[in-house]
Image (cartoon, rainbow, N blue to C red):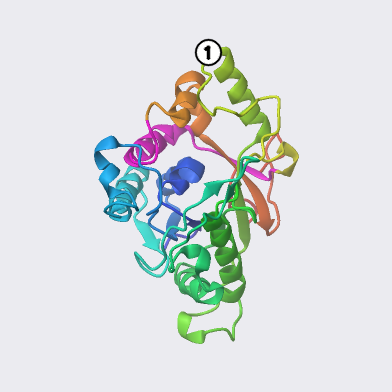
Amino acid sequence: MPDERLLLVHAHPDDETIQNGATMAKYVAEGRGVTLVTCTAGEMGEILVPELEHLAADREDGLGEQRRGELEAAMKALGVSDHRYLGGFGTYRDSGMKWHPDGYAIPDDTIHDNAFWNADLTEAADHLVAIIREVRPQVLVTYDQFGNYGHPDHIQAHRVATYAAALAAVPSYRKDLGEPWDIAKIYWSAMSESRMREGLRRLREAGEQTAFEGMDPEGPLPMTTPDEDLAAVVDGNEHVEQKLDAMRAHATQISTDGPFFALSNNLGNQVWGVEYYRIAKGVRGPAGEDGLETDLFAGL
C-alpha cells in the first residue's frame, strides 16, 4: 500500500476526469495511491454520439454499460488501477436532472426507484465506510454541499462521502466493516472564478460565442468559487494530455468540438492542467506564493 493515498467520490463517469483528471494522473505518476469510487453508471446522461442514441434511457436503456467501458478507458489513460462502483456496478442508478430557469440543476420530474437520489443514506454510506477502512486514505475529494451545480446525484455523493467519512472514524461503528480510520483532510472540488472569467473572456475575444453559451464573463458564475475561498491548487500540466485522452474516452458525454475542448483549443491545454480545491476538513499545510497549498497532502 502506498504511503500516501487519495480517495475520490464522484457521481457519474466523466465527473472525475473533468474535475480531477490531472490531479489523479499526477499522483499516480508520483507513486501515490489513487482510488476512485463512482456512485452510478450515468444511465440518464445525454448521448452526444448519434449512432449510440439507441442506448438512451427511453429506448434500449443501455447507456450505463457503454459508460462503464468509457470509464475503464479513461482510468487507463490516467493510470488509475483502483476504481470501484459504490455498492457494486448497478447498485444505484443515475437520478437524472433538469435545469432550473435560474441555470442550476434540480431533480427531474420522474425518478427511477433505485435512483441514487432515493438511496438510504446510511446504507449507501456503509458501502463507502468499508472502502475507507480498506484503503485508509489520508485525503478525500468530493463535491460541495450543492454538488457544485445542483445535480441531485452530486449532492447525494457529497452527503454520502461526508457521512461515511464520519462513520468510518468511529471505533464502535460497524466493526464488521473494518478497523476505524479517520481521514485527515477532506476537499471539495472547485473551479476558480477568476480563471473561468479569464477563460470566457478569451473565448469571446477569439470569436467563440457558442461554447458555454449564456455564461457572461462579467456576470454571475454560480458554478465557480471565489478565489478567496480556494485552499489548494494542483498543477498537473505535465499530465494534461492524459487528462484530454481521458476526456475523449468519455465519448458519449464530452464532444471534441464542444465547450470543454473549445477552452483547450483557444486557451491552450494548460486550462485543464491546473485544478482547484476548497478544504472542508483538516489543517491547511504550507502554501505557495499565491497562498494556496500546492499538494493535497501538504502538512501530513
Image position, residue 39 (x, y; %): 45, 61
* Residue 25 quadrant: top left
Query: Of 262 and 46, which appears nearest the observer?
Result: 46
Q: What kind of element bears circle 1?
A: loop
Q: What range is drawn magenta here? A: 230-255
Who's the residue at 49% across and 33% down the image?
Answer: 272
| Image: 184 above or below 100 | below
The reply to whether residue 190 is in sight is yes
Q: Report if residue 174 lies within the magenta region.
A: no
Please give the residue where the numbered disc 1 appears in the rendered image: 207
Left or right: where does residue 123 sit relative to residue 195?
Answer: left
Quarter placement of the C terminus: bottom right
* Residue 50 quadrant: top left
Image position, residue 205 (x, y; %): 58, 13
Left or right: where does residue 149 sit relative to residue 266?
Answer: right
Q: Report if residue 245 lies within the magenta region.
A: yes
The reply to whether residue 23 is in sight is no
